[in-house]
Image: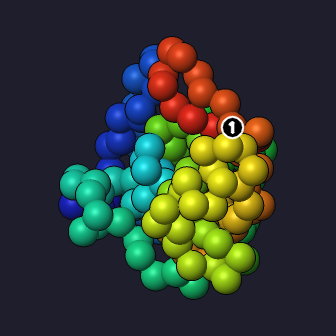
Amino acid sequence: MPLGLRARVLCARKWARSVSYVQGQSPTPRTREYFYFIDHQGQLFMDDAKLKNFVTCFKEEKFLEFFFKRVKFNRTGRYESEFPYVSPCGREMNYVRCDDLPVVFSHLLDSSRQVIQDMAAHGASTGQGTGLLSYGGAGHRLTVPFHPPSLCMLPGSGRVYHR
């Protein structure tokens, strides 16, 4: 196997395990495996990308919608501790690891699915807000209803979660 195709990945886990894989490897005939990473901002990358920033993340909304709608816990028996989530696609298995959780809300949308610029005008500060939370970098394609009382913050990390 050419050295350029071999990826040695250090997982972002407390125990810092490493795992070897080759993007597009075929563990059984007519199957392929790919490996992805979701950062704390919800951006999706190929796991072995050396630079992970806005330039190198996936941006195509239809692909992101397809990928994120299929994300579930990894119960495949392969890479379960290193890649706790998968996004199956036909005969492909896309293994996913992330900084925290695979769903990161990035925008608050109004009922017409436009980004809300002034959250106070929409009642978010009073707990009366309505709207949609967008995730996965797919804009209006991936949303859940926003309920301000469902917000919670973990003091240890400072991260805000929506139940």
Residue displayed at 41% across by 32% down: 12
Residue displayed at 66% across by 54% down: 123
Residue displayed at 60% across by 44% down: 125
How many discs appear? 1
Can you say whether 110 is above or below 153 in the image? Answer: below
Q: Quadrant of the N terminus?
A: bottom left
Can you say whether 141 is above or below 73 in the image? Answer: below
**Residue 58 visible, this orientation:** yes
In the image: residue 42, left or right of residue 49: right
Q: Position of residue 163 (x, y in %)?
A: 76, 40
User: Considering depth in this image, is 5 or 58 the residue closer to the camera?
Assistant: 58
**Which image quadrant is residue 142 in?**
bottom right
Q: Position of residue 82 (x, y in %)?
A: 54, 36
How does the figure colour the protein chain or chains? rainbow
In the image: residue 92, left or right of residue 54: right
Q: Secondary structure at mark 1?
A: strand
Residue displayed at 69% across by 65% down: 132
**Residue 82 visible, this orientation:** no
Can you say whether 6 is above or below 15 in the image? Answer: below
Q: Position of residue 156 (x, y in %)?
A: 51, 15
Q: Position of residue 15 (x, y in %)?
A: 46, 17
**Which image quadrant is residue 17 in?**
top left
Neighbourhood count class around disc 1 (C-alpha, 10 Å): few under 14, some 14–19, many 20 upward: few
Instruction: From the image, tell me which residue sits under label 1.
Output: 151
Can you say whether 89 is above or below 1 in the image? Answer: below
User: Considering depth in this image, is 14 or 10 the residue closer to the camera?
Assistant: 14
User: Considering depth in this image, is 100 or 104 the residue closer to the camera?
Assistant: 104
At label 1, the amino acid type is Leu
